[in-house]
Image (tube, rainbow, N blue to C red):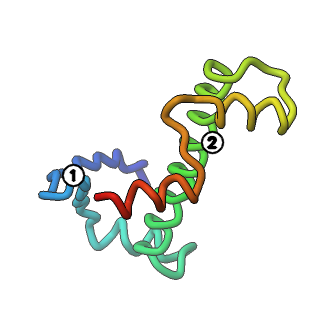
Amino acid sequence: MMAQQLTIEPTSVIDGNGNLQLTISITPDEQKFMLNELESIENWVSNSVAGKLSKCRKRMIKEWNSKIVPEPVDDSQWLDTITSRSDYDNKNERVKKDKKK
C-alpha cells in the first residue's frame, strides 16, 4: 500500500462581521482513516482550532506584556502600570461615561 499524499486546499471567506469561515473537503477514504481513531472529525477540528487559538493567545499576551510591562513584575507593579495609563478606566468610571452617552 502506497502512502497517500494528502493535499487540503481550504477555501475561505471573511463574513460581514470579519469572521473567517473555512471550508475543507475530505474524501470518503480519508474520513474512514480518521474515524478509525476519532469519534467525530468535526469535534476534532473544532478542538484543534480552539487549542491552537489558546496557545497563540497565550504567546501573544506573553510577548506583548513583556514589551508593555518590563519583567519581572509583581501583581502590584503590573496593576500600577495598567491603572496609571491615560486610557484606563475602572468599572465606576466606565459606567459614568456610558451614562453620559
State the quadrant of the C terminus.
bottom left
Viewer-nearest residue: 78 or 16 = 78
Q: Residue at x 63, y 42 (%)?
A: 58
Amino acid tagged 1: Gly
Rounded to the nearest angstrom, the CA distance separating label 2 from label 1 is 22 Å
Q: Which residue is mark 2?
A: 58
Q: Residue 24, image x and y in percent? A: 25, 59
Viewer-nearest residue: 53 or 94 = 94
Compared across the picture, whether 41 is left or right of 20 comes to right
Task: Check whether the beta carbons of the residues at disc 2 and disc 1 lie within 8 A of each other.
Answer: no
Q: Residue 35, image x and y in percent? A: 47, 76
Mark 2 is surrounded, within 10 Å at the Cα level, by few (under 14), some (14 to 19) or many (20 or more) other residues, namely few
Q: Which residue is situated farthest in the bottom direction here?
A: 39
Task: Check the image and report above or below for 29 versus 63.
Answer: below
Viewer-nearest residue: 15 or 38 = 15
Mark 1 is surrounded, within 10 Å at the Cα level, by few (under 14), some (14 to 19) or many (20 or more) other residues, namely few
Q: Residue at x 84, y 36 (%)?
A: 76
State the quadrant of the N terminus.
bottom left
Q: Residue 29, image x and y in percent? A: 33, 69
- Number of numbered discs overlaid on the protein picture: 2
Compared across the picture, whether 68 is left or right of 39 comes to right
Q: Which residue is mark 1?
A: 18
Amino acid tagged 2: Lys
Q: Residue at x 15, y 52 (%)?
A: 13
Element under disc 2:
helix
Q: Residue 41, image x and y in percent? A: 43, 73
Earlier-in-chain disc, 2 versus 1: 1
Element under disc 1:
loop
Viewer-nearest residue: 57 or 80 = 80
Q: Can you tell which mark lies on residue 4?
A: none
Q: Residue at x 59, y 26 (%)?
A: 64
